Image (cartoon, rainbow, N blue to C red):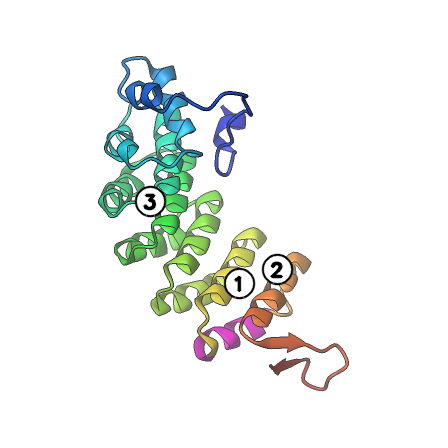
Amino acid sequence: MDELIEAEPYALEVVDSPPDIEQLLSDLISGDVTRRMLAARAFSEIQDERSVPALIDLLADDCPLVRVSAAYALGRNPCPAAVEPLIATLLQDWNGYVRKGLVWALGNCQDARAFDSLVDALVTDIPAVQLWAASALGQLGDPRAVAPLATALKADPVAVVRSNCAWALGKLGDKEAGVPALLSALDDDDLSVQQDVREALNTLGYHYETDAADPFEIA
């Protein structure tokens, strides 16, 4: 199970012949749980809008492996109709791996309706979900995300979450609000976070000069 759920996103084995899309679409509604899971997993690599209705239905599947596969597949096949079901599942699914896939999918959908749920995931969920919630907020491009991302960058105890917050602040491109938060994180205890903060500042037009009196100068 760990090998399956840790893939970001799931990768299919390389095969010589192209996948049978019609068979995969049929397998999405199969009574066999393994067929449903493998078909949903296939659509994490294949884009076909015909898969979306069945994938939405699979978000309610009894098997968490099916649900997480469907979440990643919907992230690969983003659709406005999937946003509300993804949000609803995020709010109620007990499985952290499923929620991780859901926030990844919502980030790919880039739909403002997901904002509140993603902020809640950033603040309250487990680290594996928080880090993808941070990235998803960066992908949304909503300036309201700067404040919760800045707070998490400063206070979250998990380095990889702070790193993703830094990336997201750079992605949002809000110099006025984002730069002060990033500058305050330059002395983070974790070197990888410091590096991600520098890269985010570079993205925003601030270039690091090691010998300068003010090490960050705007481009």
139 lies above or below 98: below
Q: Are circles 3 and 1 on residues that touch, CB within 8 Å?
A: no
Which percent across, then down, holds residue 172? Answer: 44, 67
- Residue for badge 3: 78
Identify the magenta region.
176-185
Q: Is residue 180 magenta?
A: yes
Residue type, numbered disc 2: Val
- Residue for badge 2: 193
- Residue for badge 1: 166
What secondary structure is found at the residue carrying circle 1? Answer: helix
Dividing the picture into quadrants, the one containing residue 115 is: bottom left
Q: CA distance from mark 2 to mark 3?
A: 30 Å
- Residue closest to the eye, 133 or 202: 202
Which percent across, then down, holds residue 27? Answer: 32, 18
Q: Earlier in the sequence, mark 2 or mark 1?
A: 1
The residue positioned farthest toward the front in the image shown = 17
Q: CA distance from mark 3 to mark 1?
A: 25 Å
Q: Which mark is residue 45?
A: none
The mark closer to the camera, 2 or 3, is 3
Residue at image point 35% right, 22% down: 24
Q: Is residue 62 magenta?
A: no
Secondary structure mainly formed by the magenta segment: helix
The residue positioned farthest toward the bottom in the image shown = 213
Q: Are circles 2 and 1 on residues that touch, CB within 8 Å?
A: yes
Which percent across, then down, holds residue 208? Answer: 67, 75
21 lies above or below 152: above
